Each structure stands twice: as structure tokens, then as C-alpha cells.
Amino acid sequence: MAAQSKTSPGSGSIALSEVAHVSNLARLGLTEEELVKLAAQLELIVAAVGKLSQADVSGVEATAQVGQARNVTRPDQVAPGLSAAEALANAATTEAGFLRVPAIQ
Amino acid sequence: MSLLEEPIRELGRRLREREISAVELAQAALARIEAVDPAVGAFLRVTPELAMEAAVAADRTLATDPGGAAALCGIPVAYKDLICTKGVETTAASRILEGFVPPYSATVVERLAALGAVPLGKLNCDEFAMGSSNENSAYQITRNPWDLERVPGGSSGGSAAAVAARLACATLGSDTGGSIRLPASFTGVVGVKPTYGRVSRYGLIAFASSLDQIGPLTKTVEDAALVMTAISGRDPRDSTSVEAPLDGFLEDLHRGVEGLRLGVPREYLEVGIEPGVRKVFDQAVSSLERMGAVVEEVSLPSTEFALSAYYVIAPAEVSSNLARMDGVRFGPGFAGAKNLREAYETARHQGFGEEVRRRIILGAYALSSGYYDAYYLRAQQVRTLVARDFEQAFAKVDAIVSPTAPTAAFRLGERTADPLAMYGTDVLTLPANLAGISGISVPAGFAAGLPVGLQVLGPYLGESICFRIAHSVETESRLWQQLPPVAGLAG
Amino acid sequence: MISPSQTGWEAVIGLEVHAQLLTRSKMFCSCRADYLGLPANSNTCPVCLGLPGALPVINEEGVRLTIRTALALECEIPEFTKFDRKNYFYPDLPKGYQISQYDLPLSLRGRLDFQVEGRSVRAGITRVHLEEDTGTLHHAGEIQTSAFSLVDLNRAGVPLMEIVGEPDLRSPAEARAYLATLRQLLVYIGVNDGNMEEGSLRCDANISLRPIGTEPLGVKVEVKNMNSFRSVQRALEYELERQTEVLEQGGRLVQETRGWSELEQRTVSQRSKEVAQEYRYFPEPDLPPLLISRARVEEVRADLPELPAARRERFQSQYQLTEEQARLLTDRPADSRYFEDVVAAGVSPLLAANWQLGDLQGLCNAANLEVANCRIDPGSLAGLLRMVENREVTAKVAKEVLARGFETGESPAEMVRSQGLGQLSDADEIAGWVDQVLTEQAQAAADYLAGNERALGRLVGTVMGKSKGRANPVIVNQLLRERLSRPGG
């Protein structure tokens, strides 16, 4: 796969290896076939999104959140939560009150 | 006229005066759902026992304290399946949440329950709210009551279709890039996207945290204002919710538009509006002018970048929000997985549909090292520009009007093979989400027999101006009294 | 232990300390923060369980305690700070991301002064930030070979403060001293309980070597799983040796994470953790940022308790104690408070210090208790010591009643009074015992007269015994000498 420029959106191509890498990060378990199809679609989307590079954002602050809220906190108090039964009610596999997952390796 | 065709205020009067009971009203709704919903597919699950329970309780309140009963007491409502309902399966229309029964209810659900609203069930939507046509549900198709071969719009397609077919008096949906306003436009109902922070998101399964809002879909603007009054307000459990007065939601409805300055964004009309839709829009604008509004052109120059910014920010946030869907604490799990990685991948591969996967990858990509600055950071900067555009426009005009969507409802399957075309459906609605301002879609007419909505956008916390304008349009057109053919199935 | 100067290599060490904060509730929800001993998964709510739709809300006390720590470490506190999401998958991380701080933390650029091997060292603090703890995993055997893991989310969401130190430490001994000093500081200011065994205080280390006198840093190895001061020092000593050996033989070191094995007393590579972890940090959209006003900072600063170094100094100057005494008494804040309470009740500081550090500490050590938690409260000890000072009771008897009161909870001073154990100073009564003893212990008397001073001590001891320890030892001594110096006695 072609070497990827990591600094310019809109260059249009997104390497299969990158899609595989991101799919791996996101634990999506995509098959080879699915990755190829997705990469093709993503290429188009990324190209469209690449329009962003044309915007003049010099000196513009990023908005992580709209609204002027600041310092929203709560007092340090304990309130009742879920019982263990409620907490585990939706879990597929539990054991002796714990959630159970396969080997981490 | 069926009970469900009456506005909430009228139903409320009849309930208080004991002309009808809440139980009767609930039964009428349930009967309509049974008769009509097989054709429409709005409901994922109906909860008759809970409805009856709530109706009985509402009747008690109405009998003992009619004067004190809330406007929504005894009124049948339903919730998009993205909103957590305690003890009732909530799936976000995804397989990965199949069987998930939340141990808690969203704040909006609690608020409506406390007022005596009657919950009918959970409504179909696009999986995790990702989509503009409601075709991304893992469970079923929802059809547009005005033409069953067409989409109702998304992602709150079920919420819109249910109101259009008069199966509930009001539904709640969610709007991240237009997911309330768009289906409202496609199905000929009223849909409100509140100002970001107006309505608590606690209990809304998160799509894009900085864009999502829960809002009402109803048949009339006043109905929407009533629901907004009930669900709005600061929630200590949602740090992004704000304390804001419900200034004039109901009081200002009837003030008319005389002297109001309305802006039409030049850039919105340049995106390729279908002629039929454009005609309806122009007629609506003329109508507003006749009623005394002054209409002028405004410019929102960053519009051309808004779609791109949205399709970076929303996927980025959702890629993170969906990381908790790992099959461990809820969901169908990962039987047979040999190790942890396989467990995660099995659960998520089997559980997520194509659009969800697409956006997770896009989002994770935009946040990954080497791309963060070029995509995510830049998109957030563009967001600032979009917000500024609106601020500057609202210095000149009181509200902005536009078509809600470039087209009317398209056919089922028409855009599913072309993600970009699908994304383009939101081009007129998503800027408001980026800026966090308020918006409403109100039925404005028909194009080739399909509903077309007028979008009204107001400044930050400016819902009342939107309601006022929308109400004028509605009073003039009386479109809400026209029903789709399928609604007649119940007789 | 190879010393760097012998080999020409210099160790460059920086510690990363995670400290659970002593809040009542978790960092982003209202579940209890003290989760130890609770049945598995019984301390959760939709928020810390990571259920769909749940949202975090910042615990204001977590912020306050972090600011307090930052001030105690002389850090700068910026006006604007925010939380970020750190995204990765692990079973103990229910949301699939940890709410932490990335580029705009609560504090930066501080320092910690400490003593090691008689030297004063100043180490830089890079930053102190706030985040949430994960749940806990349990395995049968080793995590690498276990067939499955059990997850308990009781701890998920507990407030965690991360203190990152500059790589200013130059030896394992320095690292240990830094850690001990930091721990003491955190306990003193009431933000953490200092418990490494139970995991409320954790330490990871970064260590690299470079030729002495050079600037560029060598290959960095991260060392984890050290559960005590001693294992921190041992693990770093091991690494130092291992790395030195590799470099001396011309080999190359790998940048990696290694875990300390207490059992095998060596570090083991955890290569599997090296698979590129990309955290994709971005600002937490569910939490508005924090603006920390200067007034708020001063408010927290005004609340800062006396820090250990200042208290050590003050104990020396105010109470005329030695450096050693001051150090021991102030090692634990509760002990220093105990001491001051005893002095405030009217006991001379030197006497109080001797008894607290001597007899009382001895009793406590044997019973595995802390002075502040034992049955002798400051008032009790003070009551007894005042009697000692006033010569109402002998030291010997005082020790006995102290030991008894320690067991039973009775007031030692009361015991002296009610059981008539007070010091006897009646010369005639004492003379009676003296004469008895001189008769019975004629040999000892002869030894003394022959010039053996120690024999007098034995005689004093015997008289004390006859008086059940109550005779005024000064008078006993005096009378014995008188008798023994009389001609013909």
C-alpha cells in the first residue's frame, strides 16, 4: 500500500493497513473482505471531509462544547446505587458475583 | 375524529372534565397501534401493561385533583428506543443491545412519568441514531405513513411515523444532525431540536455527546411546546444541561409574526433543493410575509464546511461512546471466544451494523495520532465559525427559515448503497447542531403528495421565537388536520 | 549492588505515583469511594458501571484535594483545566475509556525536597492531575496463563490523583526516599491514606541509564507491580544491574514495560503490553471545563495543614527535641498530634517524647497497633506522666500500670491512686527494707564496699522489689549509701 501522508486530509487515499489498524483499535473484528469494502467507502468519505482543509481557521479557537457552562460539579456525597443483582442482571457471563471474561493473554 | 387526532390541550380538557378517561385514551392508542402499526412498523415494542398502569394512576389524579393535574396527565406518549426505560428492553435498534433491560430510566422519562404521561412503548430508529432514513435499524423497517414505499426519515423515523399515523399524542426522539427535524419534515409532523443543554441527556444512549438533544415530535406546535415545557430544565445528572427559563414557550405562541425579521440563508438554497420542495418553501415564505414578517437574505458562509465538520466530530465522539458496547456487562455476549480480544471482536462484529462500523472507523481514524490536528481539531475550529455565522445572522434577524431537507421522502433502498448521498440529507439541519442553537420543523406543504417541512432556527435558548413562527405557519396552513391514508386503517 | 560510579553509568529515574483520594464518593458518581471489603459489584451505579446513557458529574472534593496536593508540592495551578478521554479496551474499564486529563491538567511544575543518605535532594514534579480508577481483575494464577478473568467494578470510578515526577532521581535509594517523603506528605495533608499494600497508593517507575556526565537520555524501561517501598528499591536495583550488564556487554536495551516479581525477585518483560496503545485523547464532551480562580487557590492554600518538614522543624525549636525525636514523632501525623495533646495536658515535652517513643511505642509495636489507636489516649498518658513528674509514682510502677492500662483500658493514673501504688517516700519505711536487704544480701554489701559499684544497683533493685517498686529510688539509694558507709555496717 502507498505510504500515507499523515498531515493532509483531502489527499484522498486511505491505506487498507490504516483501516485495519483502526479496526483493530476499535475491536471491530472486520474480515478482510469487509475491510476492503470499508476502505473504499472511507476513501470517498475522507475525500469529502477533506474539504475541511480549505477552511480558514487561523486564529480560531476550537469549540469542544457549545454553551458557556464552567465549573459544573457536585458535592461529595454518597447516594445509593445499584444492587449487585441489578448491576449484573444484563451480563451474559458471571461467576460468584463477578463478571467473567475470557483469557486476557 | 379519532381521539388520537385531537391536540393535547383538547384531550387534556376532556380528561379533566371526565368526558373521557385516561384508560379509554390509552386503549384507543393501543388499538390504533394494533391496527395500523403492522403497516408502518414504528414500534419496536409496545408496553400495554405499563400503559394501563399509568393510565389508571392518571385517572386517579384527574378524579381527585383535576385542577392540579399536569397538561400531559393521561396523555399517551412513546419513546425512541435510544432512550433508557427502566425495566423495558432498550436496544438503540442494535443487536448489540438485544435483551438489554436498563435498571434506570432517562430523566425525561422520569419527568413525563411524574406528570402522569402514559408510556405506550419504544420506537424504531436508525441503529444508535446513525442514519437519515431509519433504514439502519437492525430489527425492522419503518415506513412513511404518507407512502409506505418510502422512508420516514431518520434517525427518529419511528418517532415521526408514530405521530404521523396518530398512534401516540407525542413521541420523544433525538436530534444530533437533524434526526428529529428531518423525519418530521418527511412525515408531515412537528419536530423540535432544543437548544443544546435545554433537555437532559441523562439516559439517552449517546451518539455524539456534544451534539445530541432529546426533543418532541407532535402533530401541532402547541403540543410540542407543552412537551418541551415538561421535559426541559437543568438536570444535576447531566453536566451539560443548563438552567434556563422556559421563557414564553406557550405564552408567545399566538403572538403572530408581524414585524419579525426572518433570514433566508443564501448558502442553504444553493445545495440543490428539489423543485417541489423549493416551491413549498417559497410559498411558506410568502405566507409569512403576508402575515407581516420581513424576510431578507442572510449569509452563513461556513455552511460549505459544516457537513465535513459534522462527519468528523460525530463519528469521533461516537467511536468513543460505543466503546462500552463490549458484550461484558450487557448484550448477547461472546460465547465460544477463546480470549479477550476475540470476545470483544465477536460481540462487536456481530452486534454492530454497517453504518455503525463505518462511523466508528471514521471517528477513530479522525482521532488517531497523526490525524487529530488535521481532522478533529480542525472540525472543532470550523464549528466555532459555524456558531459565529449564526450569531452574526441573529444580530440582524430574529430567526432563520429554510427548507428542512433538500428533498421530500425518498424511496426505501434508494440511498442505502451511497453513504455520501445519505449524509447529504442532513446538510440543512446539521449546522444547527454544531452551533447548539434551537430549531423546529413544521409542516409547510406537499411536493408530489409527500410532506415538506419548513425549518425555523432560533438563537441559543431561542425556542419561543421558533414556536411562534411555526405556530403562525401551522395556523395558516392547518396541515395537521390532514392525515396520511394509512392512519385511516384504524377506522 | 553495583554503584553507577563504578561502571561509568548514571541512573535516571522518574516515578509515577497514583494516589486514591480520601473522598466520600467516587470521582464522577455518588457511589462510595471506600470500596474495600464490599461484596463484588455491589458498589456501582449506571455511571461507574458504564451503562448506555449514563453521564459523569465531577466530584468537587476530588478537585479540591488535588489542588491541595499541588500546592503542597509547590506546583503552578493554571486558570483553565479540563478532562479528556483516554480510549482503550480492558475488562476493568467499563466505558472503554478512562476520564483523565491530557494536555491541560490541574497543575504543573512543582517540586519535592527529601533527605537520603544524609543529603538533601530536590526532585521536580512534572504534573499532578485527576482521573478515575479502574475496576479490579482477579485470576486463578498468573494473568498471562489464566483461562479467564473475573471483574469487580466496585473500585471503578474512585478518584485517582496521578503525580508524575521529573526524571531527577539518580539511585534506587533516592527513589525510595522520594516515595516515602511523598507518601508522608499525602498522608499529612489528608488526601491519601498511604496504603501501598491495599493499593490506595501505587508506584510505577521509569528508569534509563546514560554515561555519567552526558545529557541525552538512554532507553527508558517502565517498571510496574511494585507494592512496597522495599520492592520499589529492589526492583530498581535489579533493573540497574540488568541494564548495566547489557550495556557493558555492548548490547542494546529495549524500550519496554517490565513487571516486578516479588516471588522471583526480578523484573519480567511484559512485551505483550507493547502492542501499540493508541489512546486517541480528546476533550471529554460530557464535562464542562474548570476555571480555577486565584481566590479559590488561596482558599485551598489557607486550608493546608502544617507540612511534615515544617512540623519537624517546629518540634525541634518549640519543644527542644532532638532531630531524631522530632523525626520519629512527626513521621505519622496522628503520632505528632498525640504528642502535642500530651504536652498540652501539662507534661514536659522531653518526658512526653521519651515515654511515647519508648514504652508506649514498644507496647504498640508488640500489639501491632498505632499509638493513636491504642487504649491509652493522650489524656491518659498525660495523667500518668504528670504523676511521674511530681514524683507521685516511680518510673518502674508507672511502666507497669501503663502496660496494664494498655491491655485493659483502665486509666493508669487511676490504678495508681485506687490501688495505692504511689511512690513511697517515708524514710523510716524505706529504712526498714534497706536494713532487711543488707542483712539478707551481706555478700552484695561486701562487694560494694570492696569497690564494686554495680553491687549497689543490685541492692537498690532488691529494695525496690520489696517495696513492690514503689519506694522512691532516690531515697533508697541515699539510705543504702548511708548505711554502707557507716562504720561497722
Image (cartoon, coloured by chain):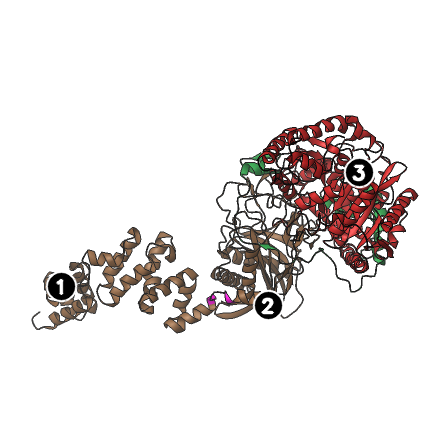
The residue tagged 3 is B480
Quarter-of-image position of residue C432: bottom left
Question: Is B151 left or right of B240, judged from the image as shown?
Answer: right
Query: In which chain is the residue bearing label 2?
Result: C
Q: Picture coordinates of residue B142 (x, y %)?
A: 78, 33
For the record, the magenta segment spans: C302-308
Name the amino acid, label 2: Arg
Q: CA distance from mark 3 to mark 2?
A: 57 Å
Magenta segment includes B361: no
Can residue B365 be seen by looking at this rendering?
A: no
Q: Colour of chain C?
A: brown
Name the amino acid, label 1: Gln
The residue tagged 2 is C294
Ranked by sequence position, the earlier of labels 1 and 2 is 2
Can residue C152 be seen by looking at this rendering?
A: yes
Name the amino acid, label 3: Trp
Tag 3–tag 2 contact (CB < 8 Å): no
Question: Is C286 left or right of B139, judged from the image as shown?
Answer: left
Tag 1–tag 2 contact (CB < 8 Å): no
